Image: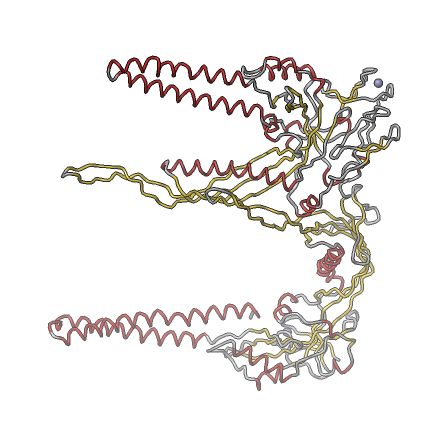
Amino acid sequence: MRDVDPDAWTPPADFVSVPSTVDGVELWGPRPAEDDASAWARQSTKCPQCGASAAFDPGAGALTCRFCGYVQEQQARTVGTAAEQNEFTLEALRQFEQGWGVERRELHCSDCGANLAVEEGGMTATCPFCSSNHVNLQEASQAGIRPKFLIPFAVKSDVLEKNLRTFLGQGWMFPSSLAQLAKTDKFVGIYLPFWVFDARMDGVWRAQIGHPHTVTYWENGKPKTRTEIRWKWESGGASDTVNGLLVPGTTRISAKIAQRVEGFELDALKEYAPAFLAGWRAMTYDLALPEAWDHGRARMRERNRATNEAQAQRRTGHVRSFTMTADFEDERWRYVLLPMYVSAYVYGGKTYQVLVNGQTGAVAGQKPVAWWRIAAAIAAATTPSIFVGICLGVPLTLFAGIGFAVMIVGFLMFLGALWWGWGLWQRALDAESA
Amino acid sequence: MTPATCDRCGADHLVPDGELGTCPTCGRAELQAAEADPEAGQPELVVPFVLDDAAALKAIAAHVREGGWFLSGDTSPATLRKTLRRCWWPQWLVDADLDGVFSLEVGFDYQVKSNKERFDGSSWQTVEEIDTRIRWEPRVGRIRRRLHNVETPALRDHEGWAKRVGPTERSTARPHADADLHGAVVRLPDLPPASAWAEALPALTDAAGALARSGASAEHKRDITLAGRWNDQHWTWLLLPIWTASYADHTGQRWLFVVNGQTGAVTGARPKKVALLWLVWGSLAASGFAASVFGALLTLVSIPLLTVAVGAVLMIVGIFLFVLGLLVGVFACIPLFGGLSWNKAQRAIQPP
Ligand SMILES: [Zn+2]
Ligand SMILES: [Zn+2]
C-alpha cells in the first residue's frame, strides 16, 4: 500500500460529497453535469460599447452591433460529429411520453422586465416594449429537452436572395412573374429543432432464389430445350451503419421540403451559446423523440432492406418471398438546432412554403404551376403522333398495308407522348405539393 | 504447562506437564523440553471444540476409507487413538486504526430500448427490446475508523495445513477458561506480530476495501485502490480447535492426520503400498503374457487343421486368447500408474 499523507489529501476540485452508508467512510463523486438553466441563457446580448441590442451576424460569424459596429467573436467550441450523443434510455423516453416541454410558457424580459407570452414552441422573442433581442430560454424549456448543439447561420441575405431568385426563376412550367417574388425580407431565420440519429442495423434475409436450369424435352420426336427456374430457400445478411440521420423536430414545416434542403454539414456543430440566437428565432420541438425515432427508424430500415434485397438479387437475379429482420444496435440520438430560412408566400390566393438551408444556402419549396403551360406542352407533344397516325396513316391505307404500319407507329408515338405527359404532370403536382 | 519443541519440524508447543510424547505437528519425532519464551504472550480467545475424541477418530476413519485399496500402514482407530492429541492452533486477530484514502468505480444499472424490425414481404413489424446497461462513475473517499478482529495467520504453514482443514467459524469464540487448556497441546505462534504485520496488511486492506465499497450505494463496484496509514495495532491470540493423530506406514515413515475440531474436516497423507502395486501389476501382466503366447501357439497349430471344423474352432479360441492376453497386459498398468500418482499427491500433503 502506498504511503500517502491523508492529512494533506483533498478530493479533486470537480468532485462533490456524496452520501456514504458506513460510519467513518466519506465519499466524493463527480459534480453532476451542470443543469443550471440560468447558466445556459445567462449571457447578455447587449452591446458592451453602446448598450444597444446586438445580434448574431452570419456574415461575420459573430455578435455584432449595427449601431456602433462592435463585433464580439464567439468562443463556442466547434464539436462537429463528436457532439455528445444520448442513448435511448427508458428514463429519457418516459420524459417525452409525459409530454415535456410542450406546454405554454411565459418569458421574462430581463432588460425591461416585461412578461411576454410566447407562442407554443417558441424559444426566442424580441421584446416589443424595449426591442431587446434578449435570449431568455430559462423558463422556456426544461433540462431534458434543451438543445446542447447548433449550427449557426452562415448564409448572408445577398446569397439568400440570389439563391432564391435562381430557385424561383428555374423551370418553364411556372409563372414568369414568380422570380419577382424573391424578397428576402419575407424570410425569417429560425433555428429549427432537429433530431439526429445514429444506428447500425444487422439485417438477415430469407428468400426463395431461382436457379435457371436448361431442360431437354422431346416434341414430335425431336429434342428441344427450355429454361426452367428451380426455387430454393436461401438466406444471407448485410449490415448498414447510418450516421447523422436528420428528422425535423417540428411538424410546422413540410418534412418533404425539409428533406430536400437538409444537407447540413454536421461537422460544423457548435456547443450552444445564447449569442448565436440573438436577433434570430428559435423553436422547441413539437414532434417528440419517440415519434421522431419512429420516422427515423422507418427510413433506416428501408435502407437496410435495399442493401439486403440487392444482395439477394445478386445471387441469380431471381428472388421471391423475400423476408428479413433488421436488428438495431448502437442507437444514439442528439437534439440540435439547425438554421433555416422559412417563408410562405401567397400566389393566386394560395400559400406556398419555401425553405432555405441557413448553412449551405440550398433552396427547396413549393412553387405554383402555370397549368396552361403544362396543358400546352402535353398538347404539343401529342400533336405529331396524331398527325402521323391520322393525317398520314389513314390516307395511306388506301395504298395497301403500309398505311396500317404508319398508323401503328403513330399510335406508339401517341403512347410515348402520353407517358411523358404523365411524368410532367406528376412533377408539376410535386412542385406544388408540400 | 511445559514448553516443548520438536527438533524435526521446529514447532514450539506448550504441553501438559509430564506429557511430552510425539510431536502433534509433524508426528515424526518426540517432543523435547525447551526454555520458555518470555515474549510469547498469552492466548485470549478460544473457538470451542465441537468434536470429541471419538468423533475425531470417526472423521479420520472416513478419510482413510476414501483412500481406497492397498493403503500402507496401520490406520485403525485403535492405533490412531494412541497418538490422538487435542491441540490449539494459533491465529491472530488484528485491530488497527486506519486513516486512508481510496478510489473506486461505481456502476448504476439503466435500461435502454432497442428495436428489432421484421419485414414480412409487404410491411414492417417492430419488436421492442429492453437492454440493461451499466453507467460507471468514479468515486474517491476517505476512511477514518478502527478495524476490528481482522484474521491474520500466526503460523508460517497456515496456507498449508490450516487451509486444507477449512475455515473455522469464529462467531462462537469466547475468552478461554483453564478447562479448555487442560490436557491439551497449545501450539505457539511462529509468526510473532512483528513478522505477521506483512501478512496482516493485505487482510486489513481487504477489510478496509470491503468497508469502503459498502459505503457507496450502487449496483456495481470495481477497481478499488486504497492507501493510508495504520496506527495503534492490537493483536489478539485466538486458539483454534484441532485434533491430530499419526501413524507409521510399512516402511516406518510416519504420517499425520489433522482434524478441524469444529467442522470435522480432515487432511493427511494416505500412501499406498508400492510393492503391492507392483505385485498386482506383475501377476496380471504375467498371466496376460501367458495367455497371449498360448493363444498365438494355438492359432499356429490350427492352420494345418483348418480343413476340419475343429481347426476353425481352435483358431478362434487362439485369436481370442491372444487378444485377451494383450488387453490384460495393457489394463494391468492402470492400477499401477494410478497408485504411483496417488502416492505423489499424498507426499505433497506432507513431504517425507
Ligand atoms: Zn453598439
Ligand atoms: Zn514435529
Q: Residue at x 45, y 72 (%)?
A: B339
What percent of the width, then of the height, locates residue A137?
A: 79, 34
What percent of the width, then of the height, locates residue B62?
A: 55, 79
Q: Is residue A224 above or below residue B205?
A: above
| Colouring chosen for the image of the structure | secondary structure
What percent of the width, then of the height, locates residue A33?
A: 75, 41
What percent of the width, then of the height, locates residue B102?
A: 75, 51
* Res. A244 in view: no
Viewer-closest of A217 and A155: A217
Residue at the limit of the structure toward the bottom, as seen here: B78
For residue B88, which quarter of the picture? Answer: bottom right
Q: Is residue A405 above or below residue A253?
A: above
Dividing the image into 4 quarters, which one contains the C terminus of chain A? top right
* Res. A294 in view: yes
Q: Quadrant of ligand 2?
A: bottom right
Residue B300 located left or right of residue A424: left
Residue at the limit of the structure toward the left, as seen here: B307
